Amino acid sequence: MLYHVRMDVRLPPDLDPAERTDLISREKVYSQRLQREGKWPQIWRIAGEYANFSILDVADHDELHMLLSGLPLFPYMDIEVTPLATHPSKVMG
């Protein structure tokens, strides 16, 4: 199943700099592993924001929730999920 996911990161301004660095480092490792596994085939930065648009390709809603809630930055994110379906006018190939 494909999902369009918008993630807005809202780190507290008073977050300890060492903790911030650690969170961001762990986030990168986790998300790149999912990309290599094919579960996160696309990620796009939203210019001018600490946010991204992503396409995730997972088995079902439960796997999506598990992957998103496993993100180290999850407690600091606002996330919007839109399930995607094949459009009947899409040219295959």
Image (cartoon, grey):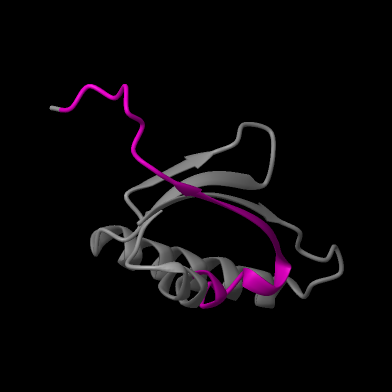
**Screen quadrant of the N terminus:** bottom left
Image position, residue 22 (x, y; %) = 58, 75
Q: Quadrant of the C terminus?
A: top left
Between 29 and 88, the one nearer to me in the picture: 88
Looking at the picture, tell me which residue is in the foreground, 32 or 25.
Answer: 32
Q: Residue at x 39, y 68 (%)?
A: 60
Quarter of the rendering containing residue 49: top right
- Residue 92's place in the image compared with 1, above or below, is above
Residues in magenta? 68-92
| Left or right, 93 with reference to 25 | left
Q: Residue at x 42, y 63 (%)?
A: 31
Query: Which residue is at 63% across, 71% downward?
Result: 74
Q: Quadrant of residue 42?
A: top left
**Relative to 65, 32 lies left or right:** left
- Give the residue furthest to the front: 88
- The quadrant where residue 16 appears: bottom right
Q: Position of residue 3 (x, y in %)?
A: 45, 52
- Using the image as rendered, state which of residue 10 and residue 86 is in the foreground: 86
Whether 6 is drawn above or below 35: the answer is above
Q: State the image coordinates of residue 76 (x, y, percent, origin top left).
A: 72, 67
Residue at x-position 82% and y-position 66%: 12
Residue 70 is inside the magenta segment = yes
Residue 47 at x, y = what percent?
62, 31
